[in-house]
Each structure stands twice: as structure tokens, then as C-alpha cells.
Image (cartoon, rainbow, N blue to C red):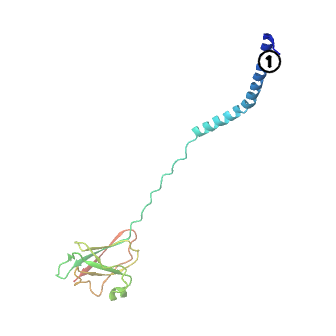
Amino acid sequence: MFLDKKAFERSCKHVYLQLNIKIHKSMRTNLKHIPGFLSLVLASAFIISCSKPAPTPTPTPVQKTPATSLQISVNDVSSGASTPAINAKAQLFKTDLDRQNKTNPLTTLVTGDANGNVMFDSLSAIDYYYNAYSNDLTKSNGPAGNHTTPLTSGVLNKRSASIK
């Protein structure tokens, strides 16, 4: 069953054409989805490249309310002249009865600086009763004590006391 050369060439050409047709049909079938897919990819790329990223919100700075504080300037008047009571001490109370009895103090006995200033921080904006003493606790502001009016919130409130 040998074919002559021409028959062999016709047969090869026929097989070649059949394969070529099948390949083209297959490619056409597969390629007809490519334009839609390609359009989708290009549209997505265009939208992504053209859209602006959402702005990053600038954090709002938190404003701290200044602490309500009290500075008691303690002066020693025992010698007749008023001089700062170096390293004076003071203590706060809520009521005058607590101050007189030295019970239920709101603070510990706080020591001041070389200028006689005793500082209390982070207080409520209420009125306070206080006792002031010399550094060695031998002098005080006496039984009358001292009383503040309600403190102003968020600021340094200043009061004074005289000891003898």
C-alpha cells in the first residue's frame, strides 16, 4: 500500500489543511473571549491608576486640660517681719472641723520649696481648708487656719498663709 509521491503529497496537504482548520477553529473559539477579558483588565487598570487614594486623616491633637492646682505661699511672721518660710509644710482638708481636728486629710503633709511655696496638683475645683507649718512643725497658722474659695478649674490658684 504504497502511495505515489503525488498521492502522498495530496494526503499530507489534506491532513495539514485539516489540522490547520481545527487549530484555527480552536483559536477562534478561545480568542473570542479575549477581547472582553482584555477590556475588563484594561478598564480595571485605568480605574485603579486614575483613582486617588483616600486621604489619610490628620489626627486631631488632644488638648489636655491643665490640672487644677494650688500654691500656698507660707510666710513666717513670728519675728515681726514677713519672710518666706523655707521648706514650709501644708495639708488640705475638706471641712473646717477636719482641719481643726486634723482628721480625714485630703493630702499628706506636703513640703514646699526654699521660697515657702507649697504646691498641690490635680485638685478638684472646690474650696479647701488648710493648715500651714514651719519646716520643723513648731510654728503654724494657728487654730483659725485658712480657707480657700472654690478653686478655678485648670489653672494655678494662689493663696497665702502666715505662721508664727
Q: Label 1's element? A: helix
**Residue at 67% over, 33% down:** 38
| Left or right position of 113 against 63 | left
Looking at the rendering, which quadrant does residue 40 occupy? top right
Give the residue at mark 1. Answer: 14
Residue neighbourhood size for the residue with mark 1, other residues' Cα within 10 Å, grouped as few (<14), some (14–19), many (≥20): few
In the image shown, does 34 or 127 lie closer to the viewer? 34
Task: Please provide percent x and percent y for residue 44.
Answer: 63, 38
Q: Is 131 located above or below residue 11 in the figure?
A: below
Q: Image quadrant for the N terminus?
A: top right
**Residue at 25% over, 72% down:** 113
In the image shown, does 10 or 81 lie closer to the viewer? 10
Task: Please provide percent x and percent y for residue 17.
Answer: 77, 19
State the count of labels: 1
| Left or right position of 157 against 45 | left
| Left or right position of 8 against 82 | right
Find the residue positioned furthest to the left: 79
**Residue at 22% over, 81% down:** 136
Q: Is 95 located above or below residue 87 in the figure?
A: below
Q: Is 112 located above or below residue 144 in the figure?
A: above
Q: Image quadrant for the C terminus?
A: bottom left
Q: Amino acid at mark 1?
A: His
Task: Please provide percent x and percent y for residue 29.
Answer: 76, 30
Looking at the rendering, which quadrant does residue 75 occupy? bottom left
